[in-house]
């Protein structure tokens, strides 16, 4: 059990590893899906191409959307791209780096599907059997143009009566399968070379800029995660205060039944400190709106000077007036 807990904590602290794992599982799922897929070409003049290209391109689009939906990085990219500038400037290089990182991982499963499909060749034969030049094959020499077109569309269907005795069916199928495999291997080789060049040559041109961009992209992701965790913690304490206020008349019964969540004195002080300046729903909404429109600048020097160790903190910026500061809860014993 401890091992599973350690693995869970590792993936929880490494969102990049989680995304890599999700994309890897999608890639394996795409191969398994294609192995279980029952490919049946319609062998009709105007439907072969639509069916073959649909099988080749539609599942990769669905896998791409799944790769974007199962990870939280796309939301961070869109939020950073759409957010107002406020007091913190936006770096387009960071947004581009985050977007490219997300797309590179999400494209793994679609590319695997396309390459596996092309190496198998069934979709390519079905889609382009009607586009083959019949003069290259002797079996279609004595047929009319209409019969040639009909025979070519029947090439993927080896059990069809028209193609059982046709000697050119296998030749056309092998011809198209060779082109399909050549295209698949070419795409794989191009992707490998592009990944190699991006991996080894990009840091050689601007290593300092790349390091800064990578740092701030990680910062945005971690900041968003910590903000969500802080919001969850704050909402929990705020709900706790609201519930205690609601049950204020039953305070004795709550104490007797140990329904006060067994808070220590230090945690209670931290709870009151966390709720400083926030007493109602409007102030919470104002706080969230301020965070979205005016994120604080990335400079903590003023904060450290303003709040040294042992000095009392200043009021929260979202508090409208001193009267809006929360009053200590008064519990009346019934």
Image: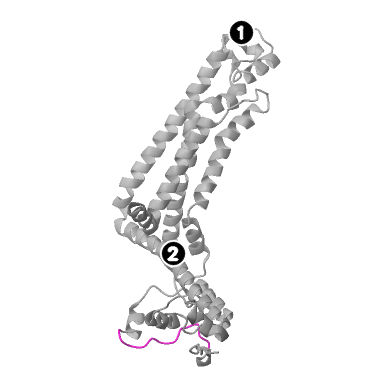
Residue 251's disc is none
Q: Quadrant of the C terminus?
A: bottom right
Identify the residue shown where x is 33% and y is 81%: 304
Q: Return the disc, 2 or 1, that comes first in the chain's sequence.
A: 1
Distance between mark 2 and mark 1 Cα atoms: 66 Å
Q: On screen, 297 above or below 20?
A: below
Identify the residue shown where x is 41% and y is 39%: 191
Q: How is the image coloured?
A: one colour
- Rendering coords of residue 184 (x, y %): 46, 30
In the image, farthest residue toward the front: 256
Q: On screen, 118 above or below 328?
A: above
Q: Is residue 4 left or right of residue 160?
A: left
- Rendering coords of residue 112 (x, y %): 46, 37
Q: Main secondary structure of the magenta part?
A: loop
Q: Which residues are magenta?
A: 309-320
- Rendering coords of residue 296 (x, y %): 43, 75
Instruction: Answer whether residue 90 is visible to the viewer in this image.
Output: no
Instruction: Answer whether residue 202 is visible to the viewer in this image.
Output: yes
- Rendering coords of residue 77 (x, y %): 48, 59
The crowd level at tag 2 (other Cα within 10 Å; few <14, some 14-19, many 20+) is some
**Residue behind mark 2:** 225
Which secondary structure, mark 2?
helix
Q: Is residue 226 left or right of residue 282?
A: left
Identify the residue shown where x is 67% and y is 17%: 150
Q: On screen, 284 above or below 120?
A: below
Q: On screen, 201 above or below 54?
A: below
Q: Nearer the viewer, residue 17 or 265?
A: 265
Res 154 → quadrant:
top right
**Residue behind mark 1:** 165
């Amino acid at each position: 059990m401890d091992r599973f807990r350690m693995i869970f904590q590792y993936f929880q602290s490494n969102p990049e590893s989680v995304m890599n794992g999700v994309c890897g599982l999608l890639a394996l799922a795409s191969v398994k899906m294609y192995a279980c897929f029952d490919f049946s070409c319609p062998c009709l003049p105007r439907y072969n191409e639509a069916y073959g290209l649909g099988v080749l391109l539609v599942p990769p689009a669905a896998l791409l959307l799944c790769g974007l939906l199962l990870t939280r990085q796309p939301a961070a990219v869109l939020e950073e791209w759409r957010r107002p500038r406020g007091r913190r400037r936006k770096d387009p290089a960071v947004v581009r780096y985050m977007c490219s990182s997300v797309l590179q991982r999400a494209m793994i499963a679609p590319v695997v599907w396309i390459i596996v499909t092309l190496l198998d060749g069934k979709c390519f034969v079905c889609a382009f059997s009607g586009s083959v030049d019949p003069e290259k094959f002797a079996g279609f020499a004595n047929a009319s143009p209409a019969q040639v077109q009909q025979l070519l569309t029947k090439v993927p269907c080896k059990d069809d009566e028209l193609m059982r005795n046709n000697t050119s069916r296998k030749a056309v199928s092998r011809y198209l399968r060779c082109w399909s495999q050549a295209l698949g291997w070419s795409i794989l080789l191009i992707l490998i070379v592009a990944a190699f060049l991006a991996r080894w040559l990009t840091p050689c041109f601007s290593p300092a800029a790349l390091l800064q961009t990578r740092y701030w992209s990680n910062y945005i992701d971690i900041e968003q995660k910590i903000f969500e965790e802080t919001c969850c913690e704050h909402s929990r304490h705020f709900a706790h205060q609201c519930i205690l206020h609601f049950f204020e008349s039953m305070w004795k019964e709550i104490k007797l039944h140990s329904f006060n969540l067994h808070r220590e004195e230090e945690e209670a002080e931290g709870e009151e400190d966390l709720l400083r300046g926030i007493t109602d729903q409007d102030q919470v909404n104002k706080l969230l709106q301020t965070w979205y429109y005016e994120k604080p600048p990335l400079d903590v020097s003023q904060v450290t000077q303003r709040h040294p160790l042992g000095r009392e903190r200043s009021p929260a910026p979202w508090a409208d007036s001193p009267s809006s500061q929360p009053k200590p809860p008064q519990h009346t014993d019934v």
